[in-house]
Structures are given as C-alpha cells and as structure tokens.
C-alpha cells in the first residue's frame, strides 16, 4: 500500500489492527510516500480506502527475517552445546561443490549439517562430506552426499583457468592452488615439461596457460586424463599439453633422453620411487620439483638430504637447491613439502 508519509503511521496501525500488515518485510520510504507491505489485500479493503494519495499495487520488499549466520546458529536448537563444538569451521570449495569434514562424534547429524550449510551458503549446488582417507594408486577418497544436487563432477577455477574435476574419479585438491601458480610462473617459453603425476592436470593447465611450452602430462588413471582432455578443450592455452595415460616410470624412461627442462613430481606419498626414472629424462641443469611428506623439527633439511641421496643414487648430482617450502599441513606434525632442485 502506498501512503503519503504524513498519514503513514496512522495507516500502519490501522493495517496491524486489520491483520493485514506484513511484518516480515521492510517498509520503504520513497518520494514522499511510504510503501507498506501487506499480507494480502482485497476489494473490500480497496473500497474502504478513500484517503488522498493511498493506492494499492505490487512491488517487492526486503525481508526483515534474518537467516542463521553460522552452522552453530542454524543448529543450536537441534544439537547440544557440546556437540556444537565439533561442527566444522572450514570447508573446501571445489567449483560449486562444498566439501565438509564432519568429526565422528557428530556424524549422526550429517544430514542436518548439510541442510544447514546450504541454508547459509545457498550458492553451492552440492554439499558433500569426506568419508575416509585418500588412498590407492589413484589417490582418491569416498564422499557422502549431504545436500543439494547429487554430483561429484564440477568445473573449478584457479587464476582464471577452468579445471574439470570429478572428486570420486581422480585426485584434486583446491589447497594446491598457490603451488600450481608458483611452478607455472617459473616456466619459460619453449621449455619441455614433464608432469609425471598430473592427476586432472592443474599444473599442466597453469603452465600451458601461461607459457608457449610443451607439457607431457602423465597419469596412470585414465579418468584423470579424460578430465584433463575436457579442461584442455575449455581453456585458451598458449602452450601445448600432451595428455598421456601411462605409468610415469616407463613413460619417463622410454620417451626422453636427458632432454626435459623441468619435471614435476607431485605425488608426495610415492614420488621417491620415481626419482631414478626422472633422472633418465631430465637434461643437464634441468629443474626437478620434488614433493614429499615430512615430519620432525626440521622437515626442510630432511627433504633436501633425501632428494640429494636419491639423485646421487641415480648417478646424477643435485646442484643448487632453489627452494624448499612447506606446501600445507598433511597430518598433525607432518607437512607436504616441495623442493626445487637443479640436476647435473
Ligand atoms: C597427488 S595426485 C596428483 C596431483 C596433481 N599433481 C595435482 O596437482 O592435482 C598423484 C597422482 O599420481 C597418479 N599416479 C600414481 N601412480 C602413478 C604411476 N605409476 N604413474 C603415473 N601416475 C601415477 C595418481 O593417479 C594421482 O592422480
């Protein structure tokens, strides 16, 4: 109902008395009029109005009902104070899929947590919960569907690059975003790069997206390579990616002869076994990006001495150690580390 400002309050009271005032929407003041939201109106109301400037019509109003702001807020009436403390504080966002980690103590609330999560973050299509640890050769885990569309496939964006991901078919972690970018920034035009454990190919996409180079992107998991092919088709790349389904050991040994400029070995639980193969492919002065899990007080010195030993065992030498850094926490007191080394 549009009412001149001066009679607005009187009319609001009248509408409350008539049970017509809609308190779940906010009154709008505009151009000397108040627009009062009504629950409904009828001809009787219209004909009883003969005040100057009063009109009925349609428009939208902001809601006065505030939704819950946090999971805790949304679930405080359904869970005990103790259980609320177990609620996840962080989540992974992969494309339009949110992935939560729900502690066993509150697992029986999983559906309610998924529903509450989507109420707070309505822009996600799907809410999943991690179920079990990453394992097997393909490095995948299972997921429990909590809410929204039942799917595990999505397109994830990193630095403007679009990456096709299927969480149950191939490894992908949004937490390696900085690492994908960091390595890609080092690549020069015309380099030959071998990404031995490419997964769905985020390193390859970042690299070929930024430089006119050739990236041999290898993975033993055919689903990972199918997803990489999809990503190649939806990005504008400067360089070329050669997607390959193969065992990285054999592929490195039989397809190169000390002529690869750079090798990425991002398979922290298994890369050590492949260093000798990488050494048959890498050129004199080439760069190896070697990843591993390390604990202890000084994991940086552990990874450095490990890669030196492995390269020496393969009959080559580590020259300069260009970088050693912690990529992320992988377990309590354990980190995923990377070292960039020059191989002679
Ligand atoms: C940690 S994931 C790769 C992550 C990827 N580099 C990224 O940044 O998303 C390790 C990958 O190694 C692959 N893999 C395991 N053994 C392999 C082998 N012998 N040859 C090639 N790929 C292998 C797995 O299928 C998995 O996709």
Image (spheres, rainbow, N blue to C red):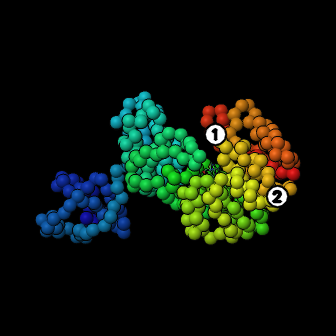
Give the secondary structure at mark 1.
Answer: strand
Q: CA distance from mark 1 to mark 2?
A: 34 Å
Q: Judge whether 92 appears above or below 56 on screen.
A: above
Q: Residues within 10 Å of mark 1 (few under 14, many from 20)?
A: some
Mark 1, ligand 1, within 8 Å: the answer is no
Front residue of 13 and 43? 43
Mark linked to residue 329: 1
Q: Are marks 1 and 2 in contact (CB under 8 Å)?
A: no
Question: Relative to 89, is 147 on the left or the right?
Answer: left
Mark 2, ligand 1, within 8 Å: the answer is no
Where is residue 296? Give x, y as percent. 71, 31
Q: Residue at x 73, y 69 (%)?
A: 212
Residue placed under numbered mark 2 in the picture: 258
Where is residue 332? Give x, y as percent. 62, 33
Where is residue 135? Give x, y as percent. 56, 42
Q: Residues within 10 Å of mark 2 (few under 14, many from 20)?
A: some
Give the mark nearest the N terminus, 1 or 2: 2
Q: Residue at x 73, y 67 (%)?
A: 213
């Amino acid at each position: 109902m549009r009412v001149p400002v001066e009679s607005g309050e009187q009319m609001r009271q009248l509408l409350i008395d008539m049970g017509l005032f809609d308190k779940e929407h906010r009154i709008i003041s505009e151009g000397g009029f108040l627009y009062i939201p009504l629950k409904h109106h009828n001809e009787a109301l219209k004909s009883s109005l003969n005040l100057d400037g009063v009109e009925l019509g349609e428009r939208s109003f902001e809601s006065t009902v505030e939704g819950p702001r946090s999971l805790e807020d949304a679930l405080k009436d359904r869970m005990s104070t103790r259980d609320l403390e177990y609620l996840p504080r962080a989540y992974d966002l992969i494309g339009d899929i949110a992935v939560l980690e729900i502690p066993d103590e509150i697992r029986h609330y999983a559906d309610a947590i998924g529903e509450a999560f989507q109420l707070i973050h309505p822009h996600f299509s799907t809410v999943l919960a991690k179920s079990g640890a990453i394992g097997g050769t393909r490095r995948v885990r299972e997921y429990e569907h909590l809410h929204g569309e039942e799917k595990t496939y999505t397109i994830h964006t990193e630095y403007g690059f679009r990456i096709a991901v299927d969480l149950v078919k191939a490894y992908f972690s949004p937490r390696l975003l900085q690492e994908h970018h960091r390595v890609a920034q080092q690549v020069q035009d015309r380099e030959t790069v071998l990404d031995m454990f490419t997964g769905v190919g985020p390193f390859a996409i970042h690299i070929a997206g930024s430089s006119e180079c050739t990236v041999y992107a290898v993975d033993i998991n055919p689903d990972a390579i199918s997803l990489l092919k999809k990503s190649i088709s939806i990005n504008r790349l400067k360089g070329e990616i050669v997607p390959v389904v193969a065992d990285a050991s054999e592929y490195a040994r039989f397809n190169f002869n000390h002529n690869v400029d750079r090798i990425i070995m991002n398979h922290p639980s298994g890369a050590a076994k492949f260093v000798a193969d990488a050494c048959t492919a890498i050129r004199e002065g080439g760069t190896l990006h070697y990843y591993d899990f390390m604990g202890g007080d000084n994991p940086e010195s552990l990874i450095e001495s490990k890669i030196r030993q492995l390269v020496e065992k393969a009959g080559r030498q580590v020259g300069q150690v260009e970088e050693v850094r912690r990529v992320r926490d992988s377990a309590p007191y354990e980190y995923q580390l990377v070292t960039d080394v020059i191989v002679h």
